[in-house]
Amino acid sequence: MASIPVVVKHQGKKYDVEVDASSNGETFKYQLFSLTGVEPERQKILVKGGQLKDDADMSKLGLKAKQTIMMMGTPSGDTANVIEKPKEKVKFLEDMTEAEAAQVEGATPAGLQNLGNTCYMNSTLQVLRSVPELAASSSSSANQLSQFGLGGLGASMDLTSSLRDLFKQMSETQQGFPPLMFLNALRTAFPQFAQKSKDGQGYAQQDAEEAWSQIVSQLRQKLKLKGASAQSEEDKAKDISFIDKFMAGKFESILECDEPAAKEGGEEPVRSEDTFFKLDCHINAETNHLRDGLMAGLQEPIEKKSDVLGRDAVYTKTSRIGRLPKYLPVHFMRFDWRKTTGKKAKIMRKVTFPLELDAVEYCTDDLKKALIPIRDQIRDIRKAEEDVERARKRQKRMRQAQVDENAVRGDEPLQKKAEKKKATDKSGDTEMEDVEFKTDAQIEEERAETIHAAKQQLFALVTPELSADEGANHTGLYELRGVITHQGISADSGHYTSFVKKLGPKDPVTGKRKEEDGKWWWFNDDKVSEVESERIETLYGGGQSHSALLLLYRAVPLSSLGEEEKKA
């Protein structure tokens, strides 16, 4: 009897097999064993009518040339699918120390106790701690971590050392922690934060944005990194500031006189470069969205003397971003000094902001030229991933519908089915073959191939200059990671809290972070709670309730490709 050529699919691979119609199912399984390494007793082969049995007559299965047959199963020596005894002894939560429990995946992070109107500092520290590079760098930059208890006695009065010690202690507890030593270091470095309240009872409330700016300025001076990414050995030996690498941007500005007479008289525009550590969102009667305030901040009117006109004139300083840092703080300028009250009054206007910020439009033409192709390619990759996911869900629905239909037809007696088949054959109509659906493994394989090709193209778009700057944004896109909020009517009163986006769980094998669940931690001094992403949308302002004062954006990375894929 002639053999029948069929295609066997197993774990995403295809095998061409010649089926001897005179043999049985056991013989066929041994054929597949020689190709796949899966022992016959571990094979599950799906044919019309169900699962292939060892004594099945292959000539009676109705096999057709080039028909596809699905096979499932793994070799007994496949260690990837064998449950092994854990290498480390399982430790239950109740048996862990406080430090061990604090470092368990998903553990609630430590809050900070309010030491008397210090909520401005607590909220600032929680958002700063969300920068993983900062915690790692502050730890490695010191010779030794100071060894002392939760009281913090004996810590250095240096702000950077105090920050390092504080972050370490916070990582070892889930309780509200008293940041006493850091507070003392902050007040020593910047006496303005030691100002007493007007009634003489305790310390005065302070502005969280001012605390952020002063801490960042101190870190810029004290926290240094080796130039590991530099090209020359000389540059590698130089120390560079952590802040300059990861949190400093560059403005390229043009200063021009608004009066045409100055230009006609030969006055040339003045070009300059400036470093910035945050973007300001100016708020006025026309500001409704973050974009409005940022664009207003890039146009600054300046009054100064014109040598050509021989008098004072109004100039406009137009700035564009020449370097986007990896971490971008954005400050809502909600506090306005009022002479009548002698206080910083709060601007209550509602200003919306995105969870993902496209910063390309604020950049120079040269930087736009480098970033736009990358940004657009990332969006294409996202769309491709969404299309694949939609196709997966659509096929799942179709497969379920087919299963339901087969279940209905399966209720009919076999004799009646055979009679229907004979009647169909006599009528000359062609019998419709069963629809073959792709497995999840096949869909995933196709998805991986499509996305891999797109990511290869993405890396090819990155310019050498952009790639060499490790601390810069390489995509032009930012994702929101932290928010400092204020509740009240003035900077000198009210209450500050902060929100930090939760990280995805860490893979114990690869060490990489998995997909995030979109939830946030809300730090209200020593009280820490988990909130949904919708809570962030309530921070737009418009009243005395919690409104965003400072946003921390992090650059959307190019990709999570491994090094071998980048080189492929």
Image (cartoon, rainbow, N blue to C red):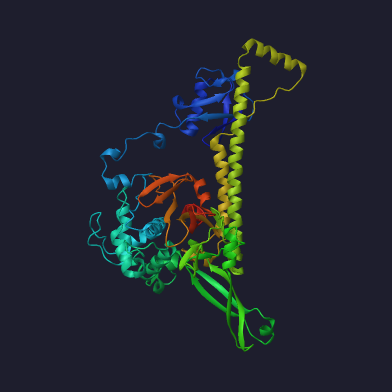
For the point 38% across and 65% down, which residue is it?
Answer: 215
Residue 547 appears in view: yes
What's the residue at 46%, 68% (across, down)?
342
User: Could you say which quadrant of the image residue 309 lies in?
Assistant: bottom right
- Name the foreground residue: 321 vs 466: 321
Position of residue 286 measured from the top left corner of the image (x, y, whole percent) = 62, 62
Residue 503 shows in this picture? no
Image vertical order of residue 45 relative to residue 309, above or below: above
Q: Is residue 421 above or below residue 529?
A: above
Question: Where does residue 230 sit, x and y in percent of width and height?
Answer: 43, 69
Is 204 situated left or right of 263 in this image? left
In the rendered image, the vertical position of residue 111 relative to residue 321, given as above or below: above
Extreme residue toward the right, this view: 427
The location of residue 180, given as percent across then percent down, is: 29, 59
Residue 413, x across and y down, in percent: 62, 11
Q: How many marks?
A: 0
- The N terminus - image quarter: top right
Residue displayed at 55% across by 62% down: 462
**Residue toward you, 435 or 318:** 318
Pick whichever, 73 or 217, lies toward us. Answer: 217
Instruction: Say left or right for 7 vs 121.
Output: right
